[in-house]
Image (cartoon, rainbow, N blue to C red):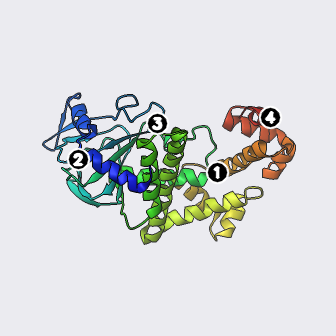
Amino acid sequence: MNPAQLTTFLLHRNSHAYSDGQQLVDDTQKSTPILIQGESVYMVDLPLGGHRADMELEDRMAIVQQSPELTIPFYLHSHIKLIYVHHGHCTLSLLHQALQLKLAAGDVVLIDKELPHRVENTGSEDMVIHMMWKQDNCSSYLGHESAPSSNTLQFLTHSLLHTIQTQGYFHMKSSTDAAIEDTIVRLLCEYFDRDFCSASLMNSYCDIIWTQLIRYHSHALQLNSHESQHATILELLRYIHEHHQECTLVTLAHQFDYHPNYVSALLKKETGYSFMDLLQTERLNKATSYLLHSDMPIPAIAEQVGYSSVSFFHKKFKERFGTTPSHYRHHT
């Protein structure tokens, strides 16, 4: 299936009243509503596999196409959700904010967990897709629970999640980043037209979508004069990454004309980690790359990434990864 075929396929599903949207309504009837601001609100979690014919157990995302002319009550999920408008337009109502977002083709909205919302009735040519990650932790959004994660990626992920939690949603308009929409379309093509390795491709697309959203959110913050501190943190993390072998708190502070105490407090406040924690993460992540992709002896790796003591390197490596460098090299 290609993007043009996807549009035809989704339009066909609209015209033939496929059961996705009705199933969503039916699911609300399985929970007892709670009254919020005078509205009945239902808890609805999309199925974890096997509930619908086009959903597989290993899928990391549950995907539902909203049926047209269908009245859906306010409901909420226990996980973060993405709404994508493939064609046409729709109105997204957020109960707590008493807000209605007008969404156009190509728009993407991330909705916080446990936020009452609904998409109002859509027309026969409006193609609205609901996508929800099945697990609720940062690693599940990027997929690789066991893979080392960079300081910058962790910071940007938490930054986006903070925006979603504070505001309740994050809206990316269609005109701002065509790459994200292109990846979502590729994911949907694989989802609705399964082929060899579709599951692997879809998991990769999930990672790419989340990473693209993180990058878009970061760029948006840097353009906001009130968020200049965000850019400062990125610069500090970039310097630690690029100079992890010899970086010290003093040299880092000197590079940006700050006092070391200020840099230490700023990093701790904005990332949740001390300077030494961030430095150790960069060094150990780099060490894993050498272990997996080179034949360099372990003492040489320790020195290459910035450790003067091999025993201290072993200690820190085991603290972080729960195993020795040698075992990691041969069993990962």
Q: Residue at x 68, y 36 (%)?
A: 321
Which amino acid type is marked by label 3?
Answer: Asp
Which amino acid type is marked by label 1?
Answer: Leu
Q: Residue at x 18, y 50 (%)?
A: 121
Q: Nearer the viewer, mark 2 or mark 1?
A: 2
Establish if 143 lies above or below 186: above
Nearest to the observer: residue 93 or residue 158: 93
Asked which secondary structure carries label 1, the reply is helix
Q: CA distance from mark 4 to mark 1?
A: 23 Å
Nearest to the observer: residue 177 or residue 291: 177
Establish if 211 lies above or below 25: below
Whether pointer 4 and pointer 1 mark residues with C-beta atoms closer than 8 Å, the reply is no
Task: Quadrant for residue 171, please give it.
Answer: bottom left
Q: Which residue is mark 1?
A: 278
Which amino acid type is marked by label 4?
Answer: Ser
Whether pointer 2 and pointer 1 mark residues with C-beta atoms closer than 8 Å, the reply is no
Q: Earlier in the sequence, mark 3 or mark 4?
A: 3
Q: Nearer the viewer, mark 4 or mark 2?
A: 2
Asked which secondary structure carries label 4, the reply is helix
Whether pointer 3 and pointer 2 mark residues with C-beta atoms closer than 8 Å, the reply is no
